[in-house]
Image (spheres, grey):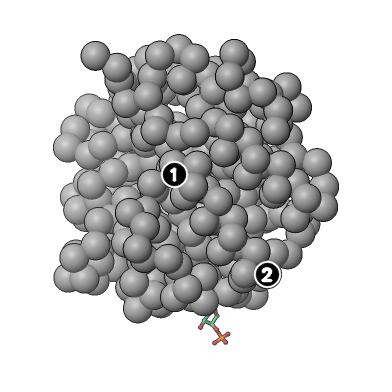
Amino acid sequence: MTRRIDIVEVGPRDGLQNDPAQLSTDQKLEFIERLEEAGIRRMESGAFVSPSAVPKMADSLDVFRRLNRARPTRHIALALNEKGIRRAISAQADEINFVLVAGEGFGHRNQGMSPQDSADMLARCAPLIHEAGLPLSATIAVAFGDPYDGEVSPTLVANLAAQAQRAGASEIALGDTIGVATPWDVRERVERVRLEAPDVYLRMHFHNTRGTGLANVFAAVDAGVDVIDASCGGIGGCPFAPAATGNVATEDVVYMLERAGYETGIDLSVLLQTARWLEGVLGHPISSSLSRAGGFPNAALP
Ligand code: COA
Ligand code: ZN
């Protein structure tokens, strides 16, 4: 039987939040529609954070209000505090993704919180999300290394995951915000998190900053993880992480998995057309390998 791997497209949020280009709300909506055309069924479509902290996400409420709800896509809203969660609920997000931090240095700069502050915030805010009847997932940012403090202990990551499980998160994403994970770290952290938070689904969020992105996807899938974050074109990064670069590119991940016999439900040709369109809208080259080489044996360059 073919194994299914679900891709969570994070281009409209993680991708655009750090790009030099400022897309209009109309362009963001077109990006989202094109991704849906390619078969994406779950995506981070915006962030309900302070507009002065992340100006590129300032129009997320408009983006959510104008989404085409006739489509089956689940639109995830990123939120980090009570105000963000309330705004995301009023925007009729289908899911809320909360951000926990596994490092002090990054945590204070990204959201003014220590790792334990972020877990406490989640515990305080989770009831709001449950009362609204929305699924709650939690991304543990800098789960493989902090740009300011260095190494992050797997014990802390597992402990945060356990607290997220207690708060009622149904899914936890391990975020390699600065692209320092290796495939062996991935296996170790997945095992540690499974021991401490056995009731949650696992999802992985890799940045390809140091070229280990696809190897890390392989390690995660090999360790039994079924949900992978990726961004079309490989755009993205965090404004609070120095030298941040993009997520693993959706087209590169889809190509690797489909060629290996996994099913993603995504049409690579349409996705590549979307990547090409995105490159034009952003006005600078995108970083995915597939956008340069095309697929094989099908989905050659559009
Ligand atoms: N949405 C919109 N505005 C918000 C907000 C939210 N979720 N949370 C706080 N604000 C506003 C407050 O209303 C306040 O506005 P004012 O100065 O006009 O009164 C201001 O932001 C400061 O509020 P405060 O509660 O003191 O927050 P803070 O300054 O400690 O910032 C965060 C906390 C989380 C809001 C902020 O650090 C942030 O948005 N970070 C974004 C991180 C991010 O998205 N990183 C990338 C993805 S991981
Ligand atoms: Zn990211």
Residue at x 30%, y 31% (from the top left corner):
193
Q: Left or right: where does residue 253 sit relative to residue 301?
A: left
**Mark 2 sits on what residue?**
24
Q: Nearer the viewer, residue 158 or 232?
A: 232
Q: How many marks?
A: 2
Residue 180 sits above or below residue 90 on the image = above
Q: Is mark 2 within 8 Å of ligand 1?
A: no
Residue 59 sits above or below residue 233 on the image = below
Question: Crowding at label 1, few (<14), some or many (≥20) Cα neighbours within 10 Å?
Answer: many
Image quadrant assignment for residue 300: top right
Amino acid type, callout 2: Ser
Residue 237: x %, y % from top left = 64, 47
Residue 269: x %, y % from top left = 58, 32
Name the secondary structure under disc 1.
loop
Question: Crowding at label 2, few (<14), some or many (≥20) Cα neighbours within 10 Å?
Answer: few
**Mark 1 sits on what residue?**
40
